[in-house]
Image: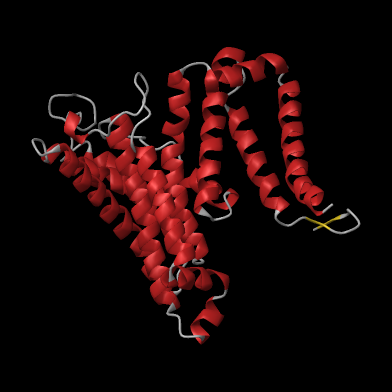
Amino acid sequence: MQRLKRSLNYLIPAGIVLAVIIVLLLIIGADIGHVLNSFAGGLFGNRYQVGEIFVKATPLLLVGLGCAIGFNCGLVNLGAEGQLYMGAVAATAVAVNGEGMPKLLLLLLMMLAGIVAGGLWALIPGIMKAKFGLSEVIMGLMLNYIAIHFNSLSIRTFLKDPDYPFPMSKTFSPAAQLPIFLERTRFHAGFLIALILAFIIWVFLWKSPKGFEIRACGCNPRASHCVGINVNRNLIMASLFSGGLAGIAGFVEVAGVQHKLMDGISSNYGYLAIMVALLGKKHPFGVIIVSILLGMLEIGGLAAQRQAGIPNSITSVILGAVVVVFLLRDRIAINKQGVTNV
């Protein structure tokens, strides 16, 4: 009986989301069977489509891991989008100035530059919250705009390709590009980096004393302070780690996908990753699963748009419905009589 109740806690929200999808498709007059076939074909039609799932999932996973660290410490990192851009700019600066270096060394330096740039950018709202009690949400949002426009400035000035008329950096040399895992796809080694980091973060947060301190600060900062835990120090550390992971996502995007820096390198990954962290229960393994599922939703949705002619906005509405319903599920408990209580 208990197992049935736990299953219902997942099946009921899934059923609600499915009903929303069917209603939306009926409203626009779409052929539901054709849409579903297009969606499935877009996911598994060929190796390129399969690879694209992990290409989309990789930045969501990396930034989602960073947001999860912040949430576990009571820090809402709404500045991850800007941290991703700053990481991409720093990694690009190393790539275009490090030509001739050995591939492994160059990639490590690019990743380190991304970590430092993203981490330092996240330190600003982290320190402001820890030292002065300012809202990290507002500061993070404002810093996003600064970082995005700094990216635009950089590809028009000091990082611009002098041989190309449009604003973008030089194309990276092969030494500055992440290896491809699957031939004739864009599935690159960034996903493996993300999986390794997810395991390291799990060990750190759930198996180390410092990780316990960070989670304690997120659960009850006052009680943590009373037992001698330095809450402000842990907030600053969590912001540094969170921004560093977003910076790695920026490095992965330019080194694994674009192979150059340009405007709009992020498809709102910094904002979507907040949903990934919440739906993944702020746990690294949950973040892995949700990031892959969202990658599937995006790739399948794009295929359905091309082949079945459904509007682009449908995918966004479905994503919003998934987030709302499954977050509400956390507030719903099925009691012994089978009645749902909010």
Res. 274 visible in picture: no
Figure check: 103 above or below 304: below
Name the quarter where the C terminus is drawn.
Answer: bottom right
- Where does the image place residue 172, in percent across and percent down from the top left? 19, 31
- Where does the image place residue 260, in percent across and percent down from the top left? 25, 32
Q: Give the residue displayed 64% in from the left and 34% down from the top.
A: 318
Figure check: 19 above or below 153: above
- Where does the image place residue 121, in percent across and percent down from the top left? 32, 57
Q: Give the residue displayed 45% in from the left and 52% down from the top.
A: 65
Q: Quadrant of residue 92?
A: top left
Q: Give the residue displayed 51% in from the left and 61% down from the top.
A: 71
Which residue is at the far left?
100
Front residue (pair 19, 50)? 50
Which residue is at the far right?
337
- Where does the image place residue 64, in percent across and percent down from the top left? 47, 49
> How is the rendered protein coloured?
secondary structure
Residue 182 relative to residue 278: left or right: left
